[in-house]
Each structure stands twice: as C-alpha cells, then as structure tokens.
Image: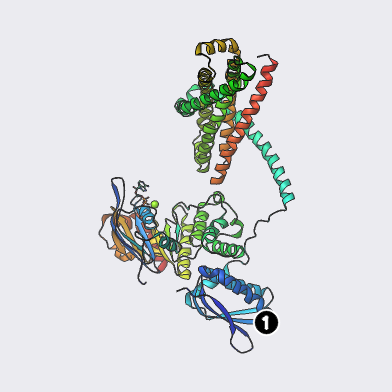
Amino acid sequence: MSITPSITSGGDGDTKRLMAAGSWTAANANLLEPLIDAAASKTAGEPSLLIDMAGVTQFDTYGACLLKRLQQARSARNEATGITALQGRFEELFSEVQETPPGAAAREQKAGSLRSAFEFLGRATIGFGHDLFALAEMLGLLCRSVVRVMANPRAFRLTSTTYHIDRVGWQAVPIIVLITFLIGCIIAQQGFFHFRKFGADAYVVDMVGILILREIGVLLVAIMVAGRSGSSYTAELGSMKMREEIDALRTMGLDPIDVLVLPRVLALVIALPILTFIGSMAALYGGGLVANLYGGMSPDIYIARLKEAISVTHFQVGMIKAPFMALVIGIVACAQGFQVKGSAESLGRQTTNAVVKSIFLVIVLDGLFAIFFASIDM
Amino acid sequence: MSEPIIHVRDLVVGFGDRVVLDHVSVDVMGGEIFGFVGGSGSGKSVLLRTIIGLLAVRGGSIEVLGTRLDTASGSERRAIERRWGILFQQGALFSSLTALQNVQFPMREYLHISPRLMDEMAAAKLEMVGIRAVDHNKFPAELSGGMTKRVALARALALDPELVFLDEPTSGLDPIAAGDFDELIRTLQKTLGLTVFMITHDLDSLYTVCDRIGVLADGRVVAVGGISTILASPHPWVQAYFRGRRATIVQSRIANRTS
Ligand SMILES: Nc1ncnc2c1ncn2[C@@H]1O[C@H](COP(=O)(O)OP(=O)(O)O)[C@@H](O)[C@H]1O
Ligand SMILES: [Mg+2]
C-alpha cells in the first residue's frame, strides 16, 4: 500500500513544474526529507514553481510539514511556489499545518567544554550552599516542631512514631546483626593473622573490643541505616511532594514537619542507638567465635581479656554518637525529600543524594567526635 | 464508514472473582468518532486497557485494524501498536522529558528521521493541539491540567496513527476548554482521517462530536447507535443519564445552538 515517494521535474510552459508522487507519510519521511531538500536547492533561482501533487496517494502531517519546508525555503529567497491537485482531505491537512508558525523550536545550545566545566563548578558550589541552607532550615523547623509538641503533648503522633520505629528499628535487626557479626569475624581473623607474627595474639581482643565499641559498630550501623531507611524516607516524602499530598496536608492546617518529619526523625533517633548496641554485641560475638575457632582462644579467656581491655567509656563513646548520627541521617533524608520536583528523575536523584550526603556527613561527624573525645580524654 | 476498525466479540475481563466486563461486543467503524459512556467504575477504562493489550482476556476476541490481537505474534502486535495512539486518563507524560521531547519520544523509537525534522514535526504537532512555542520546553510538572491533556494528545498523534484511543479527554477541564478540546478532536479527525474511540462523561461531547455512542452498564453494552437511538433505549441507566436534569439542560442548549 505504501509507495516510495518521488519528486520528478516535468511539464512544459514557462513555470517550472515538479511532479510529486507516492506515499508522503511518516513511514517514508526518512526518504522524503532528502528529496525535499534536494528540490529546494535545485529550484533555487526559479522565480516561480508549481508542484503537482496529483500523484500523491497518501499524505499525513509528515508529508505536509516537509511540503511546507520546501515552500518556506523558497519564499525565504522571494520565490513563489504554487501547489496544485492536493486531494480533498489532504488540502485541509496542508492548510492546517501551514497555519502553525514557521520554524522549529530552538535546540538547547551546548556550551564549550571549558565553559561548561566552569558552569558545572559554579552550580555545584551554589548547590552546596543551598544544601547546607536546606539542612539548617530543616533542623530549625524540627526544633520548632519539638518545642510545639512539648508544649502540647497531644499533638505528638505516637502511632506514626511507633510504626516508623518498627520499620527502621525492629525490621532492620536481622540484616544489621548479620552484617556486624560478619565484620566482627573479619576484624578478629585479620587481627589474629597479622598479630600472630609478632606474638601479640592477646591484643587482638583489645583491638576488636575498642574498635567495635568506639567506631565500627556505630559507623557501620549508621551507614546501613542511611542506605536502608534514609533512602526510603526521601522516596516517600518525595513522591508525596510530587502528588501534592504535602500541599494537601498544609491546606488542612497540618504542618508536614509535625506529621511527617518529626515521627520519622524521632524513630531514627530512638532506633539507631538500639541497633548500635545490638550490632556491637553481634560483632563482639563474631570476634569471640573467630577467636575460639581460628585463634584457639577459649571463650572464658576472650571474655576475661575483653573485660580488661574495654571500659564503660568506650561503650559510652559509641553510644553517644548514635543519636547524633541518626539526627543527621533523618534531616538529610527529609530535606532531600522536600526538594523533589515534579519528575521521576528528580525523585531518583534526590534519593541518591540523600544516601551519599548522609553517609558523608556521618563520617565527618564521626571525625569531629573523635577530636572532641580525644580532647576531653574519653 | 467502511469495515470495522475495532471488532470486539464476547469479551470477558475480570479481577479475582469479580467480572468487570461480561460478554461485551463493540464495533467501531473506520473514520468515525465513537463515544463510550458508562458510570464511574463501570469498566470503561478496563475495556480500553484490554483492547490495547494491557489487561489479560478471559474470553472472547479482539480484532483491531484487521489483526486478531489475542492470537497475534509479538511483531504483528508491534506493527499494530505503531498505527494507534493512546491518550491515558491521567495523561501519562514522561515526567523527566519536556513537552517537546515527550512528543518526539515515539518518533525517536519508530522513525529514522533527522533531528531537524523531528524538531519541526514535534513543534508542529504541539502547535496543532494548541500548545504555544513558549511552553514547548516545559516539563509536565509545569503544565496545567488542560495543557497536559493537549501534550498527551500530541504525543498520541506523533506517528500519525489511524486510530486513537482517548480516555476521558475532557474530564477535569473547564467547559470552555472542554469545548475547545472537542473541536480540536473533530478537526484533527477530519484532517487526519482518524478513527477515534473516546471514553467520556461529557454530555456536550456526546452530543456534538460523537458519530455513534456505546453505553456500558452492568458489565455489558446496553445500547449502541446515534444519539437518537440511545435516547430511545429503555435501559434505566441510559434513561437516568440522558434524561436527568443536567442532560435536559445540555439538550435544550444544543437545540438552541443548532436552530
Ligand atoms: N487493576 C485492577 N485490579 C482490580 N480491580 C480493578 C483494576 N482496574 C480496575 N478495577 C476495577 O474495575 C472496575 C472498572 O474500573 P474502570 O474501568 O477504571 O472504571 P471507569 O469506567 O470509571 O473507567 C472498578 O470497579 C475497578 O475497581
Ligand atoms: Mg476510567
């Protein structure tokens, strides 16, 4: 049914004639376009031209647009173009297409690579500033919300908070236990393997105990929670933002911070220390298991050594950090969620951002705490 | 009006133990605007989604553009999909592409044409549905409800299909915008020679643009035909819908306009 389109010059008389034929349709647009461009350049210099469309059997908007392109190319050179013998409906279609304003929308211009590199740098710097501002704003809103809830405890959303504690705390226990247990095993194994060379087996327990209680336990758990719960917070709030659910809350006189953010952040602040405790215990257990099976150290000796090596201070250092890390994760995740714009792509980007930034900030915070504890001799 | 473009026979569709469509038969002729009405939740969207192959069929047959879709192979089906365009109830524009890129998307997938022609075509399509050049590079989140529907229509028409499915194209628009949209569909149908399958609640659309109307109630098609045939149907839902107070007002207004 579809016939290859063609444009041939022909006819007689003083005006030049082009005979068009075939199917001028979307499927043939790739063949027709070069023909049109060739015709436009070949007829340059002809003051008037008649295009005979009698042979055209099929004609759609693609054909019409290309015909219009030929006509425009010629009229830009002040040359007249007549079109005849367009059949019934095709005529209407062509006049419909002719009514649309000429010229395509401008493509976005690609800047030079150096310029775009600078532009990127500038935008990234400004973006960083905006991010800090958004975090500070979220922290402020959260504090205001806490004050409001303290003044009026009935406004506190207990159900929502317990629901989120269940999700980010209780349901995370199995995976946290598994991972920290394995890390505990690995640290102990590496310790025995390397310390054995200079007969320092006994100090492996010191290393495992201090490292896990002070640093690894809380850091590992915080990073896992950022990946697991922070990302879901951002995705939830972001998709609510996209569907105007947050605006709906606001118009009902409810503050989205009270309703959505406070329960989520509070749940994290409660859950993360608990998870840290559970995770640290699992890691110590893993270390003990490896000490027994690989290092040949009986459980009694392991526990006795551990008792000597660590003090409550080490445990406290780890646990004090946990709620602050939870706060950072929660605030970053919620702030990123509120920054989601209308598109699915932006939801994905903000979710990635939330995870990357909260992990980065958790590590920075850990460094600051290390300096702090060192200076107060803890 | 030639042979049927859509030919549905004894279609049965359900979810779990609930049967939504119970032996539905519909024919849509070439070159007509077929309006489809029914109460909310009566299964209109389900019928549309079944015809275009998004939902599984329990029984019956569907033939579109001369091809049995329930038995068609993958490549036959894709060939048919190129020949129809669909306007979803919510627009379903790709949120991370601009209006122009949304319209170009099917072109990019199916046609091997130059970027310049693609730009020209997408701009022309958007102009044809009444989207001005300033809005061509906006993202769906920045468009109003009416504009979203227009862009979605432009995307449905991107490949110059022979058949378009419209799911409630005028719902959510103000009466003037809805009237414009009806006119647009009429014009496009005439100039492009389209066949239109339109689900609608809009009495105005039913009276002014639809050549034939089908009514879905209780999981069946209870009346098919021109507006006068429908008005003569004794089915209680049809009576309530077309003889209700709002319908009477619309009717008298249209009578005034035509006289
Ligand atoms: N994916 C689905 N799963 C279960 N039930 C559905 C699904 N889609 C639609 N339904 C049901 O089918 C019925 C018809 O829905 P629909 O066709 O969307 O109604 P409408 O006629 O308003 O477009 C409704 O009762 C709806 O609950
Ligand atoms: Mg519907």
Residue situated in front as seen by the camera: A144 or B84: B84
Percent coordinates x, y for residue A270 in the rendering: 52, 22
Residue A39 image-quadrant placement: bottom right
Q: Is residue B181 visible?
A: yes
Q: Mark 1, chain letter?
A: A
Q: Residue at x 54, y 33 (%)?
A: A227
Tell me the quarter of the image containing the N terminus of chain B.
Answer: bottom left
Q: Is residue A323 visible?
A: no
Residue situated in front as seen by the camera: B70 or B127: B70
Q: Label 1 sits on what residue type?
A: Pro
User: Crowdedness of circle 1 by 10 Å Cα count: few (<14), some, many (20+)?
Assistant: some
Q: Residue at x 58, y 20 (%)?
A: A192
Residue situated in front as seen by the camera: A292 or A243: A292
Percent coordinates x, y for residue B14 in the rendering: 31, 49
- As displayed, is residue A194 above or below residue A349? above
Q: Residue at x 57, y 69 (%)?
A: A99
Q: Secondary structure at mark 1?
A: loop
Percent coordinates x, y for residue A370 in the rendering: 66, 21
Percent coordinates x, y for residue A294 in the rendering: 53, 20
Residue A33 image-quadrant placement: bottom right
- Colour scheme of the rendered structure: rainbow
Which residue in the structure is indicated by mark 1? A47
Left or right of B115 on screen, residue B202: left
Residue B223 image-quadrant placement: bottom left
Q: Residue at x 64, y 36 (%)?
A: A131
Left or right of B15 on screen, residue A298: right
Tell me the quarter of the image containing the C terminus of chain B.
Answer: bottom left
